[in-house]
Image (cartoon, grey):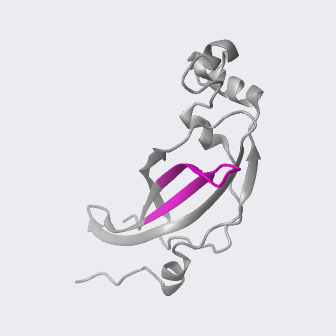
Amino acid sequence: MTQESVITDEMRAAINVESEPYVNDIEKGAIIKFAEAIGDDNPLFNDEEAARNSRHGGIVAPPTFLRSMKSGPNTVNVSSPYPANLDGGSEWDYFEPVRPGDRITVTNYLAGVHERAGRLGNMLFMVRETKYVNQFGTTVALQRTTGISYQPS
């Protein structure tokens, strides 16, 4: 017996539709506090003098700092019809360091949707991308997050 697809036309139409942008102002103190909170004592993240003598020429944010940034509200909302959810993981691409004084605009969108049969039955995979762009229009990072949902038995 074949499972009928749960991917709707609404889901397909939502692919690549960006959320509204949200601009995050990056402050040196926030970078330092974040590094302290995660226990990272790398001088690039908290020592102005040492960071100034690095190839970066000053303090930069730890890569995981981007997770603390807000994204704009979605312009299109789609969700899985299944109630059970799993985190399928995240992948990150980093292109430029984030520095104090940067203005990082964050948007997100549904990048793809597919389904397949698994041990848990039919599983729906929704891949979302979050884009981080600085004030110069340069993409500093891209995050891909996979959500997996299914109908528990």
Measured as percent of width and height from the top left, residue 99 is found at 67, 34
Q: Residue at x 61, y 36 (%)?
A: 65
The residue shown at (52%, 59%) is 129
Left or right: residue 107 compared with residue 82: right
Residue in front for this viewpoint, 69 or 87 = 69
Location of residue 122 (image quadrant): bottom left
Q: Is residue 142 above or below residue 94?
A: below
Is residue 140 shown in magenta? yes
Q: Position of residue 144 (x, y in %)?
A: 47, 54
Q: Is residue 149 above or below residue 114?
A: above
Relative placement, left or right, of 95 versus 77 is left
Magenta highlight: main SS: strand
Taking depth in this image into account, of 124 and 144 the one nearest to the observer is 144
Snapshot quadrant of residue 102: top right
- Which residues lie in the magenta part? 126-144
Residue occupying the point 69% across, 29% down: 31
| Number of numbered discs visible in the structure rendering | 0
Q: Position of residue 43 (x, y in %)?
A: 59, 16
Quarter that holds the C terminus: bottom left
Side (left or right) of 32 relative to 89? right
Task: Look at the image and say whether residue 123 sits in the magenta stretch.
Answer: no
Q: Image point 48% across, 67% down: which residue? A: 111
Residue 138 in view of the camera: yes
The image quarter in which residue 61 lies: top right
Quadrant occupied by the N terminus: bottom left
Asked if one can make out residue 41 in the rendered structure from this viewpoint, the answer is no
